[in-house]
Image: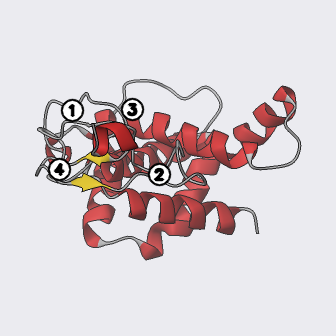
Amino acid sequence: MTGPETTGGALLPDGGSEPAAGPATQGSAVSGAPAGPASASAAEPGSVLWFPEPPSKPARLLPPLALAYIGDAVFEVAVRQHVIARPNLRPHHLHRLSTKYVSAKAQAGLLALLEPQLTEDEKDVVRQGRNAKSGTIPKNANVQDYRHATAFESLIGYLYYTGEHDRLRSLIAHGFELYEQ
């Protein structure tokens, strides 16, 4: 048997397939190309999700806090992959490095650095995420940073669910680059 099922390529909703990732990107957390088919019935047309469970609604109709929920997980994987690419792989060191990126203050900072590069649609998602009322009080952050972090996570979730994985990777990589300067 040949085709995307056996070569690792992702089956697209239109019946075509996305080429399998090469050895350098196979299994890459932010590659956006999972091994095997993924349904995109509620995700945007042509988008390929990491797992076969699409959201219940198109990304534009999901509540900002739902986008932030998945965005938090996607960003966490991106951060973990970023810190594992460094030379010191001791668990405590990895955890310490990761927390520098995933705190509300860090995510608010990343958003501030990336905001000038966002499209109008992305800025709209950020605005909705920032204004969403989560009902929880942040323990280790001020309310403003917490809201901006939620906005950042909403943007990540939106880009993931709309299938804009190249844009997602680009923004995260550029954000890491700017944040580390």
Q: Callout 2, which amino acid? A: Ser
Q: Secondary structure at mark 1?
A: loop
Q: Is residue 123 left or right of residue 140?
A: left
Please name which of the two marks, 2 or 4, marks the residue nearer to the observer.
2
Q: How is the image coloured?
A: secondary structure
> Which label sits on residue 173?
none
Q: Quadrant of residue 18?
A: bottom left
Residue farthest toward the front in the current orientation of the protein: 1
In the image, residue 85 sits, relative to residue 124, either above or below, namely above
x, y (%) of residue 145?
55, 46
Give the residue at mark 1.
55
Q: Callout 1, which amino acid? A: Pro
Give the residue at mark 2.
31
- The tag earlier along the polypeptide, 4 or 3, is 4
x, y (%) of residue 76?
56, 37
Mark 4, Cα crowd under 10 Å, few <14 / some 14-19 / many 20+, is many
Q: CA distance from mark 1 to mark 2?
A: 19 Å
Identify which residue is drawn at 14% across, 52% down: 45
Give the residue at mark 4.
44
